[in-house]
Amino acid sequence: MDKNIFVVKNLDPKTISRLFSKIYIDKITGCWNWTGNLNQTGYGRIRYLGNKVLVHRLMYSWIMAKPLSKTISRNNLILDHICNNKKCCNPKHLRLTTHKINMLRGNGPSAREARQTHCKRGHLLPIKKNSSGRRFCQICNTMWARKRYRLIHKITPDKFKV
C-alpha cells in the first residue's frame, strides 16, 4: 500500500458512534456540521488510527469508498466543499477537483481577479493573459506609458499645440 494514499475501508462501531456523535445535521442546508475539534483553518478533525485527520476527508473516503492522496500537489485531485462550509462533512457536498478550480471558486484575491471583467476605471479587460500570465487594461497601460514618456522627456502640453 502506498504511504501517500489515504484509504478508509471499514470503521468499527465505536469509531462510527464517536464520529456521528459530533455531527449536527442542518435540515435547511443539508450540511453535516462538525461540532468537535477544529484545526486552525476551521476544518473539523478527529483522531483516526493514531493520526489527526480531517473529518471531511475521512467521511468521503469511507462513504464513497475512494482513496485520497495525503499530499497536495498540482497533479492530485483535492476535495472541494461545494457548500462553502468548512465544518461540513457531508460526502454529497464534496467533490474531487483540481487545486486551480478549487481556488477559483473561492473568494481569495486570485479568484476575485479571475472573475473581474473591467479595470478600476471601467475599461474592459482582455480575456487572454499576456506572456507574464497576467491580464491588464490596454487603455490604462497606454495612458500610463504616455504620462511616463512626458515626464521623462519633460514634454509640456503647450509643445503639442500647432
Image (cartoon, grey):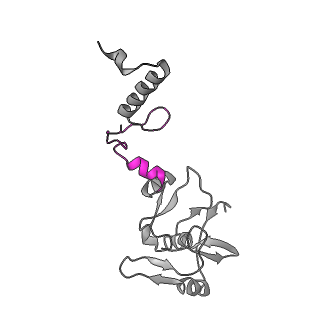
Q: Is residue 127 magenta?
A: yes
Residue at (55% x, 54% y) in the render:
76
Across and down, in percent, residue 115 comes to 38, 49
Q: Position of residue 22 (x, y in %)?
A: 54, 84
109 over 79 or under it: above or below:
above
Pick the residue in front: 76 or 2. Answer: 76
Looking at the image, which residue sits at the far front?
158
Q: Residue at x 56, y 72 (%)?
A: 58
Quick one: which residue is furthest to the left in this view? 162
Q: Quadrant of residue 61?
A: bottom right
Residue 102 x, y percent position in the rendering: 47, 56
| 6 or 107: nearer the viewer | 107
Q: Position of residue 8 (x, y in %)?
A: 59, 72
Residue drawn at the location 37% of the way across and 42% of the way down: 119
Main SS, magenta region, reads loop
Relative side of 60 to 135, left or right: right
Q: Is residue 30 magenta?
A: no
Start and end of the magenta stretch? 108-135
Q: Quadrant of the C terminus?
A: top left
Farthest-out residue, top = 162
Residue nearest the viewer, comparing 104 with 21: 104
Looking at the figure, which quarter contains the N terminus? bottom right
Residue at horizontal 34%, vertical 43%?
A: 118
Q: How many marks?
A: 0
